[in-house]
Amino acid sequence: MTDLRSEGWRVRPRFVPHGPVAPITLIADDLGLTQLAGVYPVAWQTPWAELGSLGLVRRGSRMVLSATVAGRRYQWHRHGLEDYEALREIVVARGGVIAHASRRRVVVVVTAVAVLAASLSGVIGALWSARARLEHETARASAAAIANRDLPTGWSATPTGLLSFLMPPPGRVDPVTTTTSLAVDLVTPAVVARFQRCLGVSAATDRVFGGSAQLPDVQVTSPIFHRVVPFETELATVAQYYASSSMVRRDVAEMSRPGFGACFATANASLLLSNYTGQLTVAGRGQVWTPRTFEHGWARGGLVSLALPGVATPYALVVVVIAGGHDETTLTVLTPSWPADQALVTSLVGTLKARVGGRAAAA
């Protein structure tokens, strides 16, 4: 087996209480996997025989190595693919699973038609207008997302986390559908079909995952926000801005069906589990849960219990969609302390409703 020394990783959870999570250097050799952690490195060596469910997931320019050690599931995250091929060979040689998490890219082909009467100044003006519109819509979508100022003390943004197995990368991304999920190839069709059966819609008419889904102009993912005390909890939002309010109204019509929240939460949980395990893993049946808030506006949500392989703590995955005007924002929360976090989620939904409702009233 080829020896490997790879730097620039982060690990979750910590190997020991209050231990370092970065910088991490991974060393793979015939004996096992060694982790050098911290600025003044502390070494942990684990023989290959004690590493279970080894997996490697590639997401664009990131990769995630996962393994179960002594009954706990660990994840090493790294930006950059310099060592990907060498690590892939090691994982395959040790019987591990390789998966690619990818969003389908939408390629728009623009055919330029020469019009003799068009002036150069008109073309330049149109380009500047399109750019200004994109910047305006991106700013609106960014402003609709949850930010640090919306959260109580004790929360901070993190580049990694369990929700990174579900959420698109933070920042502006290429939109695909009204969903918020990052799906493993060949897993998505099974999860989508189950969602459509659950909601009672056909693949052709489904506006969430199916053939009738319409693309937002802009989609912005917030950072993953992380809280350690009293329990490790994560949340993030995906905010989408659509060209017309009629597109949002048609989405809302489908998402207003009875049971949508349960079906959507189950689909997202299945995608998260599948990304985490590297193979199709179906979540249990979710339930409808939409918080009541003082703020007026449309929202639908659901929650599902989630047991991650190798992670002792059970979680609840809560997904709530808030929509109105040109906006659709999805709040996703992964918490081991439900229903204790119900008040927090209700408050955040109220905040998002107020933003979307204020825009709709001004439109």
Image (cartoon, rainbow, N blue to C red):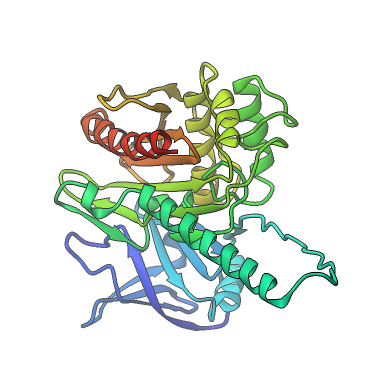
Quadrant location of the N terminus in the rendered image: bottom right
Quarter holding residue 94: bottom right
Q: Is residue 218 above or below residue 343?
A: below
Q: Is residue 278 visible?
A: yes
> Is 201 in front, or is 115?
115
Residue drawn at point x = 21 percent, y = 44 percent: 231
Q: Is residue 33 above or below residue 215?
A: below
- Residue 217 place in picture, x, y as percent: 58, 52
Residue drawn at point x = 28 percent, y = 27 percent: 295
Quadrant location of the C terminus in the rendered image: top left
> Is 218 in front, or is 127?
127
Q: Is residue 332 above or below residue 2?
A: above
Quarter holding residue 110: bottom right
Q: Is residue 90 above or below residue 216?
A: below
Quarter holding residue 301: top left
- Count of marks, rendered view: 0
- Residue 133 place in picture, x, y as percent: 53, 59
Residue drawn at point x = 33 percent, y = 46 percent: 235
In the rendered view, does 53 fall on the left or right side of 192? left
- Residue furthest top in the image: 258
Q: Is residue 72 visible?
A: no
Residue drawn at point x = 30 percent, y = 57 percent: 13
- Residue 187 place in picture, x, y as percent: 64, 44
- Residue 262 place in picture, x, y as percent: 48, 24
